[in-house]
Image (spheres, helix red, strand yellow):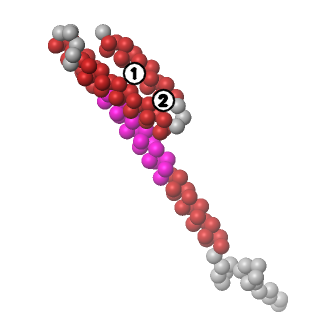
Amino acid sequence: MTTISASGSASTQSTSASSSSDPAQQIAQLNKQVQKLTQQVKDLSTSSESSDEIQKQKDLLQAQIAQLQAQIARLEAQQAEAAQQKQQAAQTKSADTSNARVEGVNRPSATNQIDIYV
């Protein structure tokens, strides 16, 4: 039964992938796992087991693939959200910087200042 070892190794690998700090690395590891599981599904067609047993194993492997793909989608969404937050923070910072430099009637600078004595 290669399914038992495949499911055990997939859950171990997904745990190690989620402990990694870089989402890009996690996504790459999960994609590798999806490729391995897909190859196992293909290899089942040449198996000498009964068709019912092969179908059960295929269903299990496909469920694992679906879980990994969902995890990849979550990580990609997190990456996109983090990138958007960084972009918004950068835009806010540049807007604050540009507002601080604006000179006008009510914002005198060191070179444009009037002293009034009464």
Q: Please name whichever residue, 81 or 9, is drawn nearer the observer in this view of the structure.
A: 9
Number of residues whose C-alpha sits closer than 10 Å to that of mark 1, classed few (under 14), some (14–19) or many (20 or more): many
Q: Decide: is 116 above or below 76.
A: below
Number of residues whose C-alpha sits closer than 10 Å to that of mark 2, classed few (under 14), some (14–19) or many (20 or more): some
The stretch drawn in magenta includes residue 96:
no
Which is more foreground, mark 1 or mark 2?
1
Majority secondary structure of magenta residues: helix
Labels 1 and 2: the sequence-earlier one: 1
Segment tinted magenta in the rendering: 65-84
Q: Please name whichever residue, 92 or 67, is drawn nearer the observer in this view of the structure.
A: 67
At 48% from the left edge and 29% from the top edge, which residue is drawn?
18
Q: Position of residue 107 (x, y in %)?
A: 68, 78
Q: Position of residue 59 (x, y in %)?
A: 24, 21
Q: Is residue 6 left or right of residue 99?
A: left
- Three-letter residue code for mark 1: Ala
Residue highlighted by disc 1: 10
At 38% from the left edge and 32% from the top edge, which residue is drawn?
31
Question: In the rendered image, which quarter contains the C terminus?
Answer: bottom right
Q: Please name whichever residue, 103 or 66, is drawn nearer the observer in this view of the structure.
A: 66
Q: Position of residue 45 (x, y in %)?
A: 21, 18
Kindly tell me whether residue 58 is visible in this rendering. yes
- Secondary element under disc 1, as helix, strand or loop, is helix
Residue highlighted by disc 2: 18
Q: Decide: is 11 above or below 28.
A: above
Residue 61: quarter of image:
top left
- Do tag 1 and tag 2 residues touch (Cβ < 8 Å)? no
Q: Position of residue 25 (x, y in %)?
A: 48, 35
Kindly tell me whether residue 56 is visible in this rendering. no
Q: Residue furthest right?
A: 117
- Three-letter residue code for mark 2: Ser
